[in-house]
Image (tube, rainbow, N blue to C red):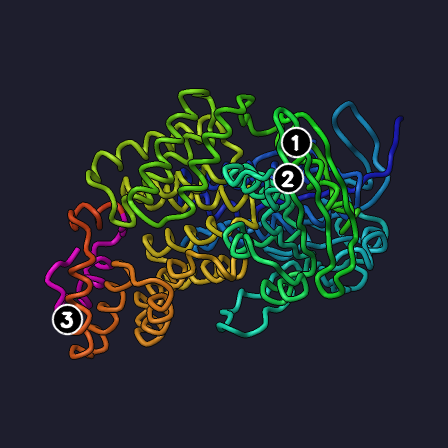
Amino acid sequence: MERKLAVILAADVAGYSRLVAADEEGTLATLGTYCATIAALIAEHGGRIFGAAGDSLVAEFQSAVQAVRAAVAIQRMLKRRNADLAPERRMEFRIGLNLGDVVIDGSNLLGDGVNVAARLQQAAQPTDICISGALHDQIEGKLEFPTQRLGERTLKNLPRPVPVHRVDWREDPMEQELPGTPLALPDKPSIAVLPFVNMSGDPEQDFFADGLTEDIITALSLYRWFFVIARNSSFVYKGRAVDVKQVGRDLGVRYIVEGSVRRSGSRVRVTGQLIEAETGIHLWAQRYDRELADIFAIQDELAQHVVAAIEPEILIGENRRALLRGTNNLDAYECHMRGTLLHNAQDSAAHFAEAIEWQRRAIALDPGFGRAHMMLARSLYARCFFGFSDDIDRDSTELQAEAARGVVIEDHDPYCHYVMCLANFAAQRPHAAVSEAQRAVDLNPNFALAHMVLGWARIFIGRFAEALDPLHTALRLSPHDPLTYLFLNRIALAHYHLGNYEEALRHTERALLLRRTYFNLVMLLACLGQLGRTDEARKVVDEAVANAPTDVPRYWRILTAYVDPKDQAHFNDGLVKAGLPIVP
């Protein structure tokens, strides 16, 4: 017999028979979704599933640290997804892990090492992670998750008691950060990537430096055990002389990445450096002189070097970019990045019109470039959202088609699923929007916009309290986002539907200080209407009407997708009480 030492993870669904008896089709659909995501998390952490039957699975890992990280990631994912379901439909897993000797039987593993993991799983409570003493000895001091010693347990059919520990995998709820107060450091390595400086001497090349920075942020944010500040907050510092210590305090991060890019003909030089924010000490620096065609390899290498310099035990694994098709056409890539730069400006109808044309050029050069289809859909949605569209039905139809095309081409791109969530809002499919938002967060837990639309989508399906955590998470991941007024507006809407009108008003007033958009003014009127403050509301009505889109009914149709008509009526009721003559 061939033997080896392995970490075994065993998992099953608590109360599975009850769930099936209550709703067989719904339970099987949920199980299929959850198991697919669990399998992806196991693979991401270097494991493989070698046994599955019904509601249970067994996997092996070579690393004790990665096995426990995988178990924690699984339970956190399940908690997030279960929040979208009614309590009686929630699917909770029990997980047991053991380090032990196993017998190899082809692709299968047998023996005492597997049996102990299975018995630990059976002894675990729903949502718990129980690990053996042998495994605990290997991870002690290497992970930030607290463990609780449960003592020696006599487990079924095992000849001797097994020391058992429980892993505390739960995260503290994301608290609302008050403006101007210092941000607490997260309990994982936290990073901000500042905009790389364009050293080419040509301002026209800014889009290239910005695109490089954005892709490095995306590459780093795919490591779920890092906390990576969103692109929108990092880019607040573009063109400014910065003190990295102050940036670290402003963004609440421990590490800063900065660099420069110089492009000359077919050559590109990229420099990058990693700095500890509190001390200003340089931890790592590198210069890359390559052909322009190697730009994607530079992005990935730089990200991996940063990861290795901060926490060598983070699993690098297979290059995540290999999962994305991208484009080999640099002209298409340049068109896409030019359009993205214009989209991010979000200043006028002309910006969006030009951004849309650049993405269309990119698609014409490479029809299989999924990110270009995604950004085309994103800009079309934004044009409608900000009231700049002259034909909402036309733009809505096109954005839905382009978003769907992007997902087909790039199913592993979190941005594509984020935009598909927006498309589902426009198509009045809120439950599908929730699924797409969840998929985006599964793929990139540092994606602030994905957390924002998850909260937004939960509002439409009536899960108002559950909407608040992802919305506050979005604010923490991007504390200086130019879209903060939108995050605050969605938080206000959740509180409004909870009947917390004063709290909703407070967030709306904060949002209006940042940008007096139509939807923020309407949110203000709804709050004032419910609070009976009609005199104050009258002073705002004329401004709201003056800022209203040309086609108000169609505007609201693609922006609100309530499942329950009573929720839409509740919102309208506040506007009627405020005296708004144009009600959605």
SS of the residue under disc 1: strand
Q: Can you say which quadrant of the picture contains the C terminus?
A: bottom left
Q: Do callouts 2 and 1 mark residues in contact (Cβ within 8 Å)?
A: yes
SS of the residue under disc 3: helix
Quarter where residue 498 is shown = bottom left
Q: Earlier in the sequence, mark 2 or mark 3?
A: 2
Percent across and percent down for residue 342 are 41, 42
Write the residue at 49% across / 43% down.
440
The amino acid beneath tag 2 is Val
Write the residue at 49% across / 50% down.
81
Determine if residue 157 is in view.
no
Which range is magenta? 559-584
**Alpha carbons under labels 2 and 1: distance apart:** 7 Å
Q: Do callouts 2 and 3 mark residues in contact (Cβ within 8 Å)?
A: no
Write the residue at 84% across / 32% down.
103
Percent across and percent down for residue 148 are 74, 65
Q: Is residue 576 magenta?
A: yes
Q: Is residue 538 magenta?
A: no
**Alpha carbons under labels 2 and 3: distance apart:** 56 Å
Residue 268 disc label: 1
The amino acid beneath tag 3 is Lys
SS of the residue under disc 2: strand
Q: Which residue is labeled 3 in the image?
A: 577
Q: Which residue is labeled 2 in the image?
A: 261
Percent across and percent down for residue 451 are 47, 52
Q: Earlier in the sequence, mark 2 or mark 1?
A: 2
On screen, residue 48 versus residue 233, left or right, reads right
**Alpha carbons under labels 1 and 3: distance apart:** 60 Å
Tell which of 214 and 107 is nearer to you: 214
